[in-house]
Amino acid sequence: MADIIIIGGGIIGLSSAYYLSKQGHQITVIDKGDLTDNCSFGNAGMIVPSHFVPLAAPGMIRQGIRWMFDSKSPFYVKPSLGGGLPAWGLTFLKKSTQRHVEESALPLRDLSLLSKQLFQDLAKEPDFDFELRNNGILAFYKTEKAAEEEAHLAKRAIELGLDMAVLSKAECEALQPKLKLDVLGAVHYRCDAHLYPVKLMQALIKYLEQKGVKIVRNQEVTRMTTNGSQISSVFTGTKEWKADQYILATGSWSPAVAKLLGLNISLMPGKGYSFMEDEPQQRMSIPALLCEARVAITPMNGQIRYGGTMEIAKINSQVNMNRVEGIVASVPKYFPDLTPAVPALKDIWYGFRPSSPDGLPYIGRSPKLNNLVVATGHGMMGLSLGPATGLLVSQLVSGQRPEIDIQAFLPQR
Ligand SMILES: Cc1cc2nc3c(=O)[nH]c(=O)nc-3n(C[C@H](O)[C@H](O)[C@H](O)COP(=O)(O)OP(=O)(O)OC[C@H]3O[C@@H](n4cnc5c(N)ncnc54)[C@H](O)[C@@H]3O)c2cc1C
């Protein structure tokens, strides 16, 4: 059995620790935070086999440019000549093709379905109640254009063996009779699920600590040394840590951490916001995606979580109220009776989606350092893909054949 250091205690690092600990390895997770609030806590909690189309897709550039000029829009790229943006943007541009969408569909579907199955297994374990619900997700649209796009997506999804159905407004109303709708219709992504991320993360931390996994909080990895083909040590300040194998799972900070090893990982933070509101009437049982507004609404913890926006920019702690107001304003346009208030600054959560330029995660052994496994870049789907990534990491570390083909996800692709 090996000594393993996992850098980063988000859903990807903790899921890796979970499957590695099942194999009996000695594991240390090091995180620069206190593991109460990284990107894996405040997200929309959606488990999304429906998302087999990567962010880099035809039409995204045109739509993105239009959104750039609207301060309340759900997508924004802050122009910059530094921070890796030009190279990232170039790859994004190159990959926004139908061919890339087609090539990504099967790998993403397989990774997602594996992850969803692993969530079902996890939910059966004692102390793992994280409110997993298999009601699917309703993607609501108000315009003919979005209806057409969604119908096209549903057709392709069904070809891929995913359970989806195009519903009329009346059929949507029948599913949640107490919720008033102002929409044309929706696609019901029946293959999807949702959960409460805070409970999931807390359950994972508790389980891992009970199993003897050492979780080191508030210690930032600031230096790493190699002996050519292997990592020999990592340092948090002056403290040196050694292991046989290392996992890089540092989310949006991955380019900076990889740089400590002389490696290049192309990735930009995609900042998003969320906030919770009480909903005592519990009118919504199926999470909603508002297609035109790009807003996600999820019932969880007896409340509703509203989330959205994607700001591609350097990591920063600024809250852009315009964009939060954009989320708030979009909700009653679809649900006339759902009127969230603009949240106070202290109630607004934000996180950074680790976004690769081609929209696929990086999962695989480093071609340069043979005791390093990279697991990052999950973008909009990191929660959803967490368990499958963790399982694959454990199989790579143990020299086992990965459960699914990971060619599309290799860091050196
Ligand atoms: C608004 C919003 C909604 C979302 N909704 C969904 C959804 O519904 N479904 C879904 O699947 N995904 C969703 N996502 C995306 C998902 O949350 C992320 O993809 C996922 O949380 C990324 O997990 P991670 O473990 O890679 O990164 P993180 O959770 O960010 O964890 C990385 C960790 O690495 C640590 N770290 C960084 N640098 C160092 C260092 N030098 N030393 C030590 N530790 C370090 C950080 O402190 C952090 O704890 C959403 C994201 C946002 C913002």
Image: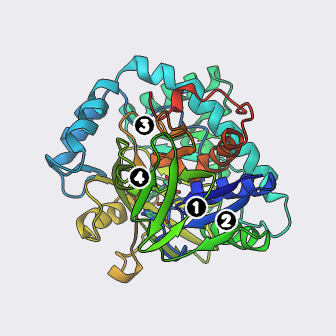
- The residue nearer to you, when weighing 48 against 224, is 224
Kind of residue at badge 1: Lys
Residue at the image point whose x is 71% and y is 38% from the top: 114
Q: How far apart are marks 1 and 3 (CA)?
A: 33 Å
Q: Is residue 380 left or right of residue 391?
A: left
Kind of residue at badge 4: Ser
Q: Residues within 10 Å of mark 3 (few under 14, many from 20)?
A: many
Label annotation for residue 200: 2
Q: Is mark 2 within 8 Å of ligand 1?
A: no
Residue at the image point whose x is 64% and y is 26% from the top: 405
Q: How far apart are marks 1 and 4 (CA)?
A: 20 Å
Q: How crowded is mark 1: few (under 14 residues within 10 Å), some or many (20 or more)?
A: some
Q: How crowded is mark 4: few (under 14 residues within 10 Å), some or many (20 or more)?
A: many
Kind of residue at badge 3: Gly
- Dot 2: element: helix
Q: Tell which circle, 3 or 2, labels the residue nearer the N-terminal end.
A: 2
**Does residue 411 appear in the picture of this structure?**
yes
Task: Tell me, yes or no, whether the two marked residues, 1 and 4, touch with CB atoms within 8 Å.
Answer: no
Residue at the image point whose x is 55% and y is 73% from the top: 35
In the image, which is nearer the foreground, mark 1 or mark 3? 1
Question: Residue 398: x and y, percent?
Answer: 73, 42
Q: Does the residue labelled 4 lie within 8 Å of ligand 1?
A: yes
In the image, which is nearer the foreground, mark 2 or mark 1? 1
The answer to which image quadrant residue 190 occupies is top right
- Dot 3: element: loop
Q: Tell which circle, 1 or 4, labels the residue nearer the N-terminal end.
A: 1
